Amino acid sequence: MKILVSALFALLTIQLATQAGAQQSLRKFELQANSPEFWDLIARDAKLDQVATGCGFPEGPVWDSAGFLYVSDETLNKIFRVYVSDGRKEEVIALGDPDGNTYDRQGRLIDCASVLRAIIAVSQDGKYKLLADKFEGKKFNSPNDVILGPDGALYFTDPTLDLPQGQKQEIPFQGVYRLDEHGNVRLLTKDLTQPNGLAFSPDGKKFYVDNSEQRNIRVYEVARDGSLSKGHIFGDERGEKNDGVPDGIKVDVQGTLFVTGPKGIWVWDAKGKHLGTIVLPEQPANLTWGGQDFKTLYITATTSVYRLETRTHGFVPK
């Protein structure tokens, strides 16, 4: 009996220690400034609000002026409307591993559908239209993030990060592509080993893309036809193994970059200076601007959606 009681006590101790460790793994919200300019963007007393929680793995937030976000849940395999007033969720569509989202110039919700290995347009009634799933006759790997370019085309990354298990990689590289309104797909670069989040500067002359595997951000010059040139490393986001990697990117109207990375959101000025880091309780994957004046950052992170008011205005392509 003593042996049994001792074993049960040991098991209970392990369980309590595991629970405590899980609780401690949640970091505290913190604003870490590397430069005084950081405080021009975020107030020292800024508060982080949890909009919703209990998600599987939320990604690809997109703001709607009706007061909700479109949010992909890669674990639950659905896209939801998440209402920012009360965290209520409404299912939009059930879809295998949806990822990054944006709007096109028609106002349609555009999604990177990883299991379909395609870029799709999602309608309000929960149906979708396939826009592109191949390059030169070969299936994409697993489209990850997508944005609207200044020329009205869609730009997206195609790493192998979510290549469906058991399926073959047909394209022998991980590319960044341009998809025009006629369905034409053009390869822009295959410089990156695992391209992820992407963004244009407000003037459309620079193009940024994360390389999650190399933990850096690359920047390119953009020609009128969307071609990229003079690519080089804009900034490195180094951290410990489990601290997170560069993922989603958003810019403000001044060209400041807000990039998810180790422990939170790294803030960079347009010249590549790391101004500071917004440390979050959960590891963020992506973010978007929202609110009436686009001064609010909405952030998807591990199991939750967060909100942070800023002092700047987000740049939103139209």
Image (cartoon, rainbow, N blue to C red):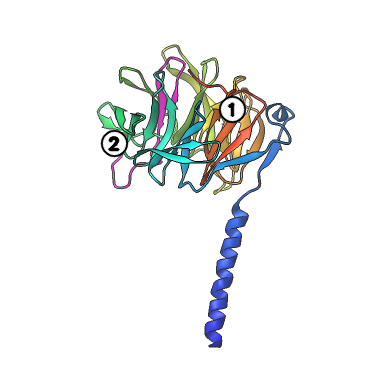
- Residue 135 visible within the image: yes
Three-letter residue code for mark 2: Glu
Is 271 drawn above or below residue 76 in the view shown? above
Residue 221 % position (x, y): 50, 18
Residue drawn 60% across and 20% down? 253
Residue drawn 41% across and 21% down? 107
- Left or right side of 311 for 197: left
**How far apart are the alpha carbons under marks 2 and 1?**
33 Å
Residue nearest the observer in this picture, 9 or 242:
9
- Left or right side of 162 for 286: right
Residue drawn 34% across and 17% down? 181
What label does residue 257 carry, if any? Answer: 1
Residues drawn in magenta: 147-169
Three-letter residue code for mark 1: Leu
What label does residue 273 carry, if any? Answer: none
Name the image quarter holding residue 191: top left
Local crowd size for mark 2, using a 10 Å CA cut-off: few (<14), some (14–19), many (≥20): few
Q: Is residue 149 magenta?
A: yes
Local crowd size for mark 1, using a 10 Å CA cut-off: few (<14), some (14–19), many (≥20): many
- Residue 61 visible within the image: no
Magenta stretch prevailing secondary structure: loop
- Left or right side of 227 for 301: right
Residue 10 % position (x, y): 56, 75
N-terminal of the two: label 2 or label 1?
A: 2
What label does residue 170 carry, if any? Answer: 2
